[in-house]
């Protein structure tokens, strides 16, 4: 018998606590990214502070803590978009120029990515119904397609591609363990990878 979404317990995180936490988490991740680029730039770990995948982890986690899909979307958007001012405020304080068009572009991307990954996190934790496995598959696909498309096919940064691929596979193993979703995640992975490739194609065309 399949457990329904409504009968599966949700994390006990009220919106009044979750949403400020999402904002704070986003600002913190963004703020740490700028010095992280200096410390890790030029190494195999550089992709961890100069890529899309790492910035989508916070929305996913905050979405998983939400009590409803609507709150998950809002928490994801707050976490993702807050990374933009967090990053650029620290970058400006460190003497780097800030481009308004880039701020607007990444904010727009954060609205979309935050909403999608916030909902993905909620679906992963719920682990039931027709979308079982889809949430985890989306996050895994982001890391794997970034490894294949951005770091591999486009930039030829093979060391960063390998790191992103390892993280993606690690997420597949770890997220699938929740509710034994491995099979469901694998069933959704192919369409999620197609969406990921299309998404990075659009991103590269815009950039």
Image: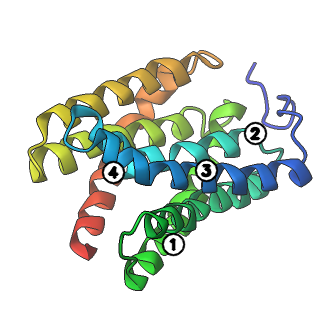
Q: In this view, does 60 lie above or below 98?
A: above
Is 202 positioned to the left or the right of 13 in the image?
left
User: Element type at marker 2?
Assistant: loop
Give the image location of residue 157, x and y in percent.
13, 41
Is 125 positioned to the left or the right of 140 in the image?
right
Quarter location, residue 66 = top right
Label drawn at residue 50: 4
Mark whose residue sits in front, 3 or 4: 3
User: Element type at marker 4?
Assistant: loop
Give the image location of residue 125, x and y in percent.
69, 32
Residue of label 1:
107
Q: Do the residues labelled 2 and 1 touch (CB within 8 Å)?
A: no
User: Element type at marker 3?
Assistant: helix
> N-terminal of the two: label 3 or label 4?
3
- For disc 4, the neighbor class at 10 Å (few under 14, some 14 to 19, many from 20) is some
Report, in whole angstroms, how far the alpha carbon at label 1 lies from the one at label 3.
16 Å
Mark whose residue sits in front, 3 or 2: 3
> N-terminal of the two: label 3 or label 2?
3
Mark whose residue sits in front, 2 or 1: 1
Which one is nearer the viewer's eye here, 94 or 98? 94
Q: In which quarter of the image is the N terminus?
A: top right
Report, in whole angstroms, how far the alpha carbon at label 2 lies from the one at label 4.
26 Å
Give the image location of residue 68, x and y in percent.
81, 49
Residue of label 3:
28
Task: Name which residue lies at 34% across and 50% down.
Answer: 51
> N-terminal of the two: label 1 or label 4?
4
> N-terminal of the two: label 2 or label 1?
2
Report, in whole angstroms, how far the alpha carbon at label 3 lies from the one at label 4.
15 Å
The answer to whether any part of residue 122 appears in the image is no
> N-terminal of the two: label 1 or label 3?
3
Quarter location, residue 101 = bottom left
Is 20 positioned to the left or the right of 146 in the image?
right
């Amino acid at each position: 018998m399949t457990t329904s979404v409504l009968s599966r317990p949700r994390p006990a995180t009220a919106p009044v606590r979750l949403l400020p936490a999402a904002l704070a988490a986003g600002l913190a991740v963004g703020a740490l990214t700028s010095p992280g680029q200096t410390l890790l730039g030029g190494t195999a770990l550089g992709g961890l502070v100069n890529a899309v995948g790492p910035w989508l982890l916070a929305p996913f986690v905050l979405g998983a803590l939400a009590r409803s899909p609507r709150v998950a979307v809002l928490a994801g958007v707050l976490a993702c978009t807050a990374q933009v001012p967090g990053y650029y405020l620290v970058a400006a304080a460190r003497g780097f120029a800030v481009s308004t068009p880039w701020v607007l572009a990444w904010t727009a991307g954060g609205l979309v990515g935050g909403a999608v990954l916030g909902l993905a996190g909620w679906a992963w934790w719920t682990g039931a119904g027709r979308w079982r496995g889809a949430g985890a598959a989306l996050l895994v696909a982001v890391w794997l397609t970034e490894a294949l498309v951005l770091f591999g096919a486009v930039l030829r940064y093979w060391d960063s591609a390998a790191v992103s691929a390892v993280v993606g596979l690690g997420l597949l193993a770890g997220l699938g363990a929740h509710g034994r979703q491995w099979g469901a995640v694998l069933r959704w992975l192919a369409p999620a990878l197609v969406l990921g490739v299309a998404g990075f194609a659009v991103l590269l065309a815009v950039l």
